[in-house]
Image (cartoon, rainbow, N blue to C red):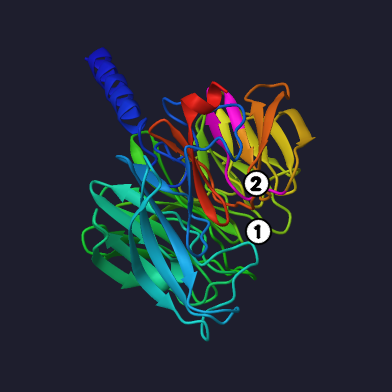
């Protein structure tokens, strides 16, 4: 019986993997960890090789969602000149075959006179959209969250659930069953919230019960399963918590010193990996099977050098790969924290989260350069590319194409034609 259940599980996982190979429905892709399913990216690519290029009005650093031949992204379009201009926060749908804009829907208007200041690297449309079952979910942090249909019609929208962010918005929601779950970490509230995908009504809200000196953070939660039990991992200033997705009850927490936490947690080889971000990031490896405050009992190991403030980590087999914001890359054994290589400098500064395809890791810099390294225990740089435009948005890969969002444009590269050149 156990063999039959195991075989069914494997078959189901293979089916889901194949079904998701043609889509990139949310931040970090179908598996939520940056792994490209069923596609092989070219070692290098550059402007002039694209299938198409489309100018995107306004500015946004959200990762595109790509499903069924359509691309969905968010942007903030200024209504005038200067830093005090109003911002129209919008969702855009683009045809994946030709790059034509199919529809553009304003969701919220942010008044320039009252809008909180954002970081110079941030945008007013940084959280990534989610596509699921014919619905598009877009999130603009303290401004609010909305659901649209395939034609761009707003089905519902709710105002933000906190009001005083610092440096703007960044963390994206995740989809868990029939809920959107996201973090709200500003100066007026530090909490994790679940809302219904049906109508935006609140399911639960859990206060972090922490008192950090700098309470603002921007991390995207991660859904994991431990011994058949689902839990949502959500890092914040001075702590990371695991929460029951049905009720919001806190299962366990680990305390640390850190704030402005940005990287999405990673769960591999039975451990949860969290960066404490600013001021001096520390990588925590946490055993996720505890209850209550497990700071002293469930931290498997810590690493204090060359840890990213902003980009998320990525894993291949038993190893973790990461790049710090200053371009120092490294490879670490997940089970022990042993450093296999690094730091190795790769050109540029880094904010986007890496992707992995066919045993190769793609690190994308803020200057628009991509460095490809082999996912191995010895450092091997394979190739570099240069888009010639600033970019902080992470890649999306779907339908035989690589989508690269720069400050002004969205590029689509046909994987087969670029690889053959």
Taking the image as drawn, is residue 346 in sight? yes
Q: Residue at x 64, y 62 (%)?
A: 121
Q: Badge 1: few (under 14), some or many (20 or more) residues near its Cα, within 10 Å?
A: many
| Residue 353 lies within the magenta run | yes
Q: Which mark is residue 69?
A: none
Q: In the rendered view, would you say 97 is above or below 282?
A: above
Q: Quadrant of the C terminus?
A: top right
Q: Residue at x 52, y 40 (%)?
A: 266
| Residue 107 in picture, x, y percent from top left | 35, 69
Magenta residues: mostly which secondary structure? loop
Q: In the rendered view, would you say 421 is above or below 237?
A: above
| Residue 279 lies within the magenta run | no
In front of the other: 111 or 9: 111
Q: Give the left or right position of residue 206, taking residue 349 as reference.
A: left
| Residue 85 in picture, x, y percent from top left | 53, 80
Q: Which residue range is magenta in the image?
A: 349-361
| Residue 94 in picture, x, y percent from top left | 37, 50
Which residue position is annotated with label 2?
368
């Amino acid at each position: 019986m156990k063999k039959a259940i195991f075989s069914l599980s494997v078959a189901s996982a293979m089916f889901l993997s194949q079904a998701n190979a043609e889509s990139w429905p949310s931040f970090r892709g179908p598996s939520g960890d940056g792994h490209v399913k069923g596609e092989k990216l070219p070692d290098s690519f550059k402007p002039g090789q694209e299938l198409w290029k489309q100018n995107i009005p306004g500015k946004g650093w959200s990762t595109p969602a790509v499903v069924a031949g359509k691309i969905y992204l968010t942007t903030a379009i200024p209504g005038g000149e200067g830093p005090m201009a109003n911002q129209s926060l919008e969702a855009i749908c683009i045809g994946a075959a030709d790059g034509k804009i199919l529809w553009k829907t304003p969701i919220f208007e942010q008044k320039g006179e009252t809008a909180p200041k954002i970081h110079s690297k941030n945008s007013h449309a940084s959280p990534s959209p989610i596509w699921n079952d014919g619905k598009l979910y877009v999130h603009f942090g303290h401004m609010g969250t909305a659901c649209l249909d395939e034609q761009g019609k707003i089905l519902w929208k709710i105002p933000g659930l906190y009001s005083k962010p610092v440096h703007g918005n960044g963390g994206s929601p995740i989809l868990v069953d029939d809920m959107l779950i996201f973090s709200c970490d500003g100066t007026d509230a530090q909490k994790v919230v679940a809302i219904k995908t049906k109508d935006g009504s609140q399911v639960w809200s859990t206060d972090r019960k922490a008192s950090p000196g700098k309470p603002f953070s921007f991390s995207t939660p991660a859904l994991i399963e431990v011994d058949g039990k689902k839990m949502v991992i959500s890092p914040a200033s001075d702590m990371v918590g695991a929460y029951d997705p049905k009720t919001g009850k806190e299962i366990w927490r680990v305390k640390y010193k850190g704030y402005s936490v940005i990287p999405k947690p990673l769960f591999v080889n039975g451990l949860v990996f969290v960066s404490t971000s600013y001021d001096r990031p520390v990588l925590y490896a946490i055993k996720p099977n505890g209850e209550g405050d497990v700071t002293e009992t469930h931290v498997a190991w810590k690493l204090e050098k060359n840890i990213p403030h902003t980009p998320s980590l990525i894993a291949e087999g038993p190893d973790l790969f990461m790049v710090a914001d200053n371009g120092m890359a490294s490879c670490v054994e997940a089970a022990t924290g042993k450093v296999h290589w690094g730091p190795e400098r790769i050109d540029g500064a880094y904010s986007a989260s890496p992707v992995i395809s066919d045993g190769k890791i793609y690190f994308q810099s803020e200057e628009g350069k991509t460095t490809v390294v082999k996912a191995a225990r010895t450092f091997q740089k394979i190739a570099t590319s240069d888009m010639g435009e600033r970019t902080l948005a992470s890649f999306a890969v779907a339908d035989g194409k690589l989508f690269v969002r720069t400050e002004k444009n969205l590029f689509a590269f046909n994987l087969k034609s670029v690889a053959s050149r």
